[in-house]
Amino acid sequence: MADYKELFPMFVFDVTKQSEKLKNSVTDIQIKAQFSANVAANTEAFGVVISDKSLIFQSDGQKMRVEY
């Protein structure tokens, strides 16, 4: 379990507690991270978005956008 925590950390962001005005619009989410050491080559990050709307995500390898 300790190895999993060190090697594969997970971060969860719950954005359900937003005002009703924001719930009916597009929410722009940016995650920026700073590390105390260089990140190893070929490190990958994955995101899971759980939503009640049907969306298509398009990426150019650097940025991601949503197609409705």
Image: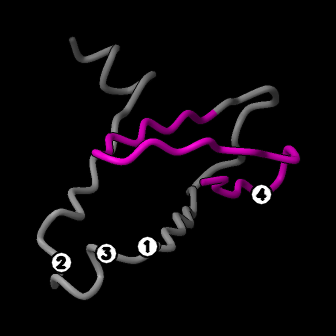
Residue depth check, mark 3 versus mark 1: number of the one nearer the observer: 3
Q: Are marks 2 and 4 in contact (CB under 8 Å)?
A: no
| Magenta residues (range) | 45-68
Amino acid under disc 1: Thr
* In this view, 14 is above or below 24: above
Quadrant where the C terminus lies?
A: bottom right
Q: Do the residues labelled 3 and 2 touch (CB within 8 Å)?
A: no
Query: How far across and down, in percent of the image, does residue 66 sit?
Result: 63, 55
User: For the residues marked 1 and 4, what is the alpha-carbon distance in whole angstroms?
Assistant: 15 Å
Amino acid under disc 4: Lys
Q: Which label belongs to residue 18?
A: 2
Q: For mark 2, does the 10 Å Cα neighbourhood hold few (<14), some (14 to 19), or many (20 or more) residues?
A: few
User: For the residues marked 3 and 1, what is the alpha-carbon distance in whole angstroms?
Assistant: 9 Å
Q: Is mark 3 on a helix, strand or loop?
A: loop
Q: Which label belongs to residue 24?
A: 3
* Residue under pointer 4: 63
Q: Residue at position x 67%, y 53% from top? A: 67
* In this view, 68 is above or below 7: below
* Residue under pointer 1: 27
